[in-house]
Image: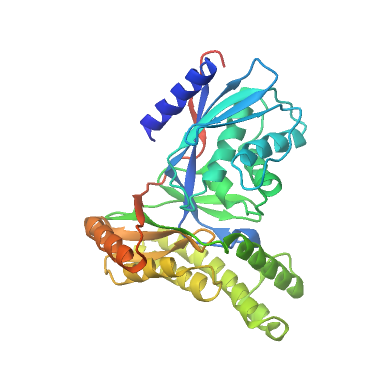
């Protein structure tokens, strides 16, 4: 955990509000495998990481609530008795949405003050929004003794994203951020919202993320289009979600759907199978098999689901040229963001320099590279004596 970040947020809160806060750390997440399966009631394999959001929070003595976004140096002011969405695409909606969804569960909260900031790289697809939502709901739950379970808090964060941020996300991001376990990835069943932790010993390998530092504008509309295509095919099959379909089932309606949508549904079915295979590979200590599945996942995202982009494909191809990378793929919604790479530690530095140079030569822009470790989920960092 970033001690400098914690101290910065704590001192920012005290300077702004003059009281001692409760401090919450809520991590970002990676997803080892299982992309675009969560909203199809499928399986995913995420893990919380050691980068996240720190929120300092305390009750307010006034009739307004103030939220200070330290990194942006911006303030949101509102009253908990009058919650309404902010303009579209604003960070403010993640806070307001959480408050509104808590109130929708007939829970009463008073006014409060928050200062928050983080070290999750922007645009990296590591779910800074879920981390922010979780930090707020976790802090408010503690502050106002709401007695919400972690599962209820995750659902509140997800609903905030749906109803205030306007993103019809699955449950994975909020769940992984809340329930993460150090050195473990979670095999999460997105239908039952139950997970099985798998401890991972990467041995002489490590995970690195390479950020393309691009986000193509197609991403939001493409996400909704694909979700709609999956739901339509599930309806044609007479099932609740593609999680319930086999490749044979899909073949039976091939003449009733477009070739593109057929491939999208086929990808989802195959990706679900890959997630289960990946969990078995980890259980059996077969990192090479895990790496192969990760490469297969990218191929499906690139060629069937069509959510990749030139920059992501270039980075994965660079990984394939290096015999020390066991697997690489795009991570997240697509059209930009990061690739996740499983690489031998001793070769990591030379790989980073080669990829950085090749990427700069190809696209005339820099990529950013981060090492990540699997961490615990949302938790209190401290608790003042008065609470």
Would residue 43 be visible to someone looking at this image? Answer: yes
Tell me if 203 is positioned left or right of 220 in this view.
Answer: left
Q: Is residue 229 above or below residue 84?
A: below
Identify the image's colour scheme: rainbow, by chain, secondary structure or one colour.
Answer: rainbow
In the current view of this chain or complex, which residue is farthest to the front?
Answer: 364
The foreground one among 71 and 262 is 71
Residue 186, image x and y in percent?
50, 51
* Image position of 267 (left or right of 1): right
- Residue 194, image x, y percentages: 60, 50
Which quarter of the rendered picture does the N terminus lie within?
top left
Q: Residue visible at 46% across and 48% down?
A: 122
Q: Quadrant of residue 109?
A: top right
The residue under the point 75% across, 75% down is 236
The x and y percentages for residue 155 are: 66, 44
The residue lying at 27 percent from left, 62 percent from top is: 357
Residue 64, quarter of the rendered image: top right
Image quarter (top left, top right, bottom left or bottom right) of the C terminus: top right
Residue nearest the observer in this picture, 86 or 129: 86
- Where 173 falls versus 17 (above or below)? below
Farthest-out residue, bottom: 255
> Where's residue 185, x and y in %?
46, 51
121 over 2 or under it: above or below: below
Res. 120 image quadrant: top left
Residue 54 in sight = no
How many numbered discs, if any?
0
Q: Is residue 126 left or right of residue 257?
A: left
Q: Residue furthest top?
A: 386
């Amino acid at each position: 955990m970033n001690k400098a970040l914690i101290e910065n947020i704590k001192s920012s809160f005290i300077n702004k509000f003059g009281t001692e806060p409760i401090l919450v750390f809520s991590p970002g997440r990676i997803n080892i495998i299982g992309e675009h399966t969560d909203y199809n009631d499928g399986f995913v394999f995420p893990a919380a990481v050691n980068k996240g959001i720190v929120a300092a929070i305390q009750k307010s003595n006034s009739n307004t609530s103030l939220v200070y976004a330290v990194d942006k140096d911006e303030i949101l002011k509102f009253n908990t008795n009058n919650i309404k969405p902010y303009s579209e695409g604003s960070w403010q909606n993640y806070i307001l949405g959480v408050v509104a969804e808590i109130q929708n569960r007939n829970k009463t909260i008073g006014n409060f003050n928050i200062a928050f900031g983080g070290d999750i790289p922007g645009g990296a697809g590591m779910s800074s929004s879920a981390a922010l939502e979780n930090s707020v709901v976790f802090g408010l739950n503690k502050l106002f003794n709401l007695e919400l379970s972690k599962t209820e808090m995750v659902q509140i964060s997800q609903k905030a994203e749906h109803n205030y941020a306007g993103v019809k996300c699955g449950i994975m991001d909020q769940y992984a951020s809340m329930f993460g376990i150090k050195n473990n990835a979670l095999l999460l069943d997105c239908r039952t919202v139950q997970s099985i932790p798998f401890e991972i010993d990467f041995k002489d390998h490590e995970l690195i993320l390479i950020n393309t530092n691009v986000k193509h504008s197609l991403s939001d509309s493409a996400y909704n289009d694909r979700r709609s295509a999956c739901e339509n095919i599930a309806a044609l099959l007479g099932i609740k979600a593609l999680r319930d379909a086999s490749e044979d089932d899909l073949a039976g309606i091939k003449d009733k759907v477009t070739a593109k949508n057929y491939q999208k549904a086929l990808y989802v079915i195959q990706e679900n199978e890959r997630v289960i295979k990946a969990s078995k590979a980890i259980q059996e200590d077969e990192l090479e098999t895990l790496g192969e599945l990760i490469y297969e996942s990218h191929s499906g995202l690139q060629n069937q689901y069509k959510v990749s982009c030139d920059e992501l494909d270039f980075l994965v191809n660079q990984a394939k040229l290096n015999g020390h990378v066991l697997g690489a793929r795009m991570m997240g919604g697509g059209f930009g963001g990061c690739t996740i790479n499983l690489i031998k530690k001793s070769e990591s530095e030379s790989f980073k320099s080669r990829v950085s140079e090749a990427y700069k030569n190809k696209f005339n822009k820099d990529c950013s590279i981060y090492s990540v470790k699997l961490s615990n989920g949302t938790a209190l960092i401290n608790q003042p004596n008065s609470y």
